Amino acid sequence: MNLHLIAPSGSLPDASVLANGEAWFKQKNIKVTNLECGRRQFQRFAGADHERLKEINDLALISPDQVVMALRGGYGLSRLLDQINWAGIANQVSQGLKIVGHSDFTAFCLALFAKTGAPSFAGPMFSYDFCGDVSEFTWKHFHDAMSEKVIEVEVIAPQVMAKPLGVTDAVLWGGNLTMITSLLGTEYLPSIDQVRGGILFIEDVNEHPYRIERMLQQLIDAGYLGQQKAVILGDISSYRLSDVDRGYDLNAALHAIRQRLGDSVPVLTGLPFGHCPDKLTLPVGRTANLSASSSGYILKANCA
């Protein structure tokens, strides 16, 4: 495996950590290319817009027998979506190129699927996940996904469900909830028809539960959530409740969403994905199977 870095969003606060990630992958016999992208800085971005755009569009030209990984999240991809060579990148994906990231990179994954039907991966990023303490869970599932194995995870935890659920060959899609809702009304969010009968997975960070609820309410009103077989929450973290909440928390937010959706679309929790050390690598735009009950669920995602 060769790992090619891109930095389409925020800049690194400390570029010295790049050496840690390079050394970690070297001991796995994986060569990391384009490390210099982690040293670019322009305002809060990892380079000016034209630099970051060229780096993305160059993916239509590079050898497809490698993995492309986003450096980190932040903000920046929304500036570039209308100028990306989606067809060219999709062609490389069809030849074997794999592209992975999360957080702000959700915009890329969903836009690629919306514009071309090509899959990508919601998963780890270089600075977040490989330049410090590396989770063996994260590494295993990333390596398995890049090796085109089926990603299987069992979550044993109480779930709010009216009846057991069994779903096969459903489109798996999602990512960062803030980024998903930011794409509503644009050509960069997959259409309802593209994801009808699908499994939506979401995560977010630094968002109060009322904001999580508001975004999910918006996705209901836009017609998306009611067309899913299930919604699965990953890590929702780093928010702060206050006295004015008076008992309102994430569970209360999800209760309101479940009331609107009814029993036909279960909202599951506990998926190891998001801004957390242990994260899955999940295909965006491929199919998955899901079996769930009140005691937990098993998700099997196809990576090939």
Image (cartoon, rainbow, N blue to C red):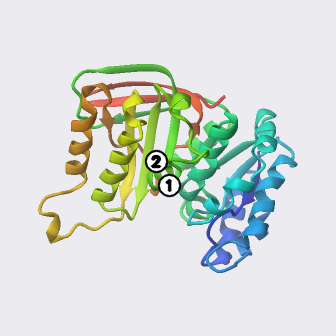
Q: Residue furthest front?
A: 185
Left or right of 287: which side holds 247?
Answer: left
- Marker disc for residue 182: 1
Q: Residue at x 33, y 26 (%)?
A: 292
Judging depth in this view, the residue of 100 and 106 nearest the camera is: 106
State which quadrant residue 129 falls in.
Answer: bottom right
Judging depth in this view, the residue of 18 and 117 nearest the camera is: 117
Alpha carbons under labels 2 and 1: distance apart: 20 Å
In this rendering, which labeled residue sits more in front, label 2 or label 1? 1
Left or right of 172: which side holds 165?
Answer: left
Vertical placement of residue 227 versus 210, above or below: above
Callout 2 amino acid: Phe
The picture places residue 49, in percent across and down from the top left corner, at 73, 69
Q: Disc 2 marks which residue?
A: 273
- Marker disc for residue 230: none
The picture places residue 209, in percent across and down from the top left corner, at 29, 57
Q: Residue at x 19, y 50 (%)?
A: 252
Q: Residue at x 64, y 80 (%)?
A: 43
Judging depth in this view, the residue of 115 and 295 nearest the camera is: 115
Callout 1 amino acid: Ser
Left or right of 72: which side holds 200?
Answer: left
Where disc 2 sits, the SS reads loop
Q: Residue furthest left?
A: 246
Q: Quadrant of the C terminus?
A: top right
